[in-house]
Amino acid sequence: MEKIRMTTPIVEMDGDEMTRVIWKWIKEILIEPYVDLKTEYYDLGLVHRNETEDQVTIDASNATKKYGVAVKCATITPNAARMTEYKLSQMWKSPNGTIRAILDGTVFRTPILVKGITPYIPTWTKPITIARHAYGDIYKNVEMKCPEGSKAELVLTDKDGNETREVIHEFKDSDGIIQGVHNRRDSIESFARACFNYALDMKQDIWFATKDTISKKYDHTFKDIFQEIFDREYKEKFALLGIEYFYTLIDDAVARVIRSEGGYIWACKNYDGDVMSDMLATAFGSLGLMTSVLVSPTGVYEFEAAHGTVTRHYYNYLKGEKTSTNPIATIFAWTGALKKRGELDGIPQLSEFAQKLEKASIQTMEDGIMDKNLSLISKLENKRAVDTETFLNEIDARLKKLLG
Ligand code: NAP
Ligand code: MG
């Protein structure tokens, strides 16, 4: 078979630990034999981030802006223990945070559904994609403890120095607490556009919810911005595809999500997204089956697995032991990027190849072949936990059949 040719490179961001090992195997076993893979390689492994004083993360983000499609391996976010382990000159920031800030992107997380791994909610037969607004609210708050007898006020000073005041509370007969939160119109607008663009891309409805009945200015502004942008820029495009923008109150949304069959995108404010994404990930079954894509408001895509570098497995690997690590979410990061590249460059063979690789991956798990953690929760009778390389080779055997 002749290898599929690519025209534009994918920005490839390598990473750390077990996922770095798997990264190489996925390319060698499942992609390079079939695709004349063109990537612009950036090593975001912690060693190289430290050597370049994290410049490599910035360079990789700018390359992503330039080419439009990136795939990223999981990376270590340093903490105190990593400072010594890697002899770091600084506690470098989370690469995902840096990339997100440069691309002004929104993260969408989608579970991969397979037979044998049943969601805790039996009606969920299709994936629910969750999008979290990753700026502001309580994540950039200012807090104070208020002694008894104190008075708390909001003070806004405009550019001419005029003050507007509003009493928050007078702590007359009890002490208490206050919190100041903010958000920015430009950030909310970017979030809304990323969500609407992704809904068009996925051809799925999008839901959004806030508590606008209680928070008549703060949350209501989120609601208004989403509605204005939708009406002005997306209404017609949605109508053409037969998809909907659906707004409701957050508590109503939660109730509807539980009763739903899935198959839509759920846009969440920062805190709701933080909480609900963990709920959804657990309810759908496994972190090893959760994919993630960062989408910028201008339509730049960075694909990755939602899980981390699987440190415990890596230490076993270093001791020479075989690990049983699930490569599926990382494979789907690659297929996401290949599909997108194929779509943008008009290379249908590339998108078809990626679809077949996804199909082969799912078939493998549905044939009962999986990693140890998945086998612990799988309801299949013929399940068999295998090591990582066997898992990849079993996928390749099925891929070969699908490719004919
Ligand atoms: P993790 O790497 O996701 O792993 C947590 C545990 O979940 C693993 O020890 C393993 O459980 C299980 N697990 C996760 N992915 C799996 C897979 N593909 N196959 C099988 N089991 C899997 O999270 P962490 O231990 O909290 O973080 C480790 C490192 O990753 C940290 O340095 C963190 O900074 C980084 N991280 C990076 C990203 C990212 O780049 N996007 C995201 C999260 C964390 P068992 O040990 O029980 O087998
Ligand atoms: Mg959380």
Image: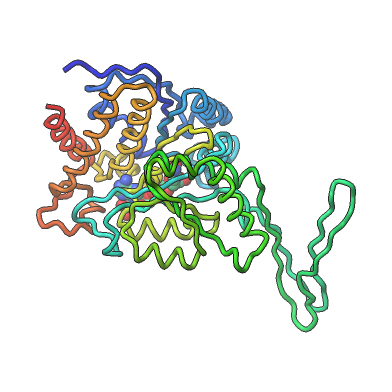
Classify residue 352 as left or right of residue 175.
Answer: left
Against 224, residue 325 (above or below) is: above
Looking at the figure, which quarter contains the C terminus? top left
Residue in front for this viewpoint, 331 or 128: 128
In this view, the residue farthest toward the bottom is 173
Horizontal and vertical percent for residue 51? 54, 27
Q: Looking at the image, which residue is at 61% across and 53% down?
A: 224
Residue at horizontal 22 percent and vertical 40 percent from the top = 361
**Residue 84 shows in this picture:** no
User: Residue 326 lies in what quarter of the image?
Assistant: top left
Q: Is residue 59 left or right of residue 255?
A: right
Colour scheme: rainbow
Q: Quadrant of residue 71?
A: top left
Figure check: 50 above or below 282: above
Foreground: 248 or 20?
248
Depth check: give the residue in front, 359 or 177.
359
Q: Residue at x 54, y 55 (%)?
A: 269
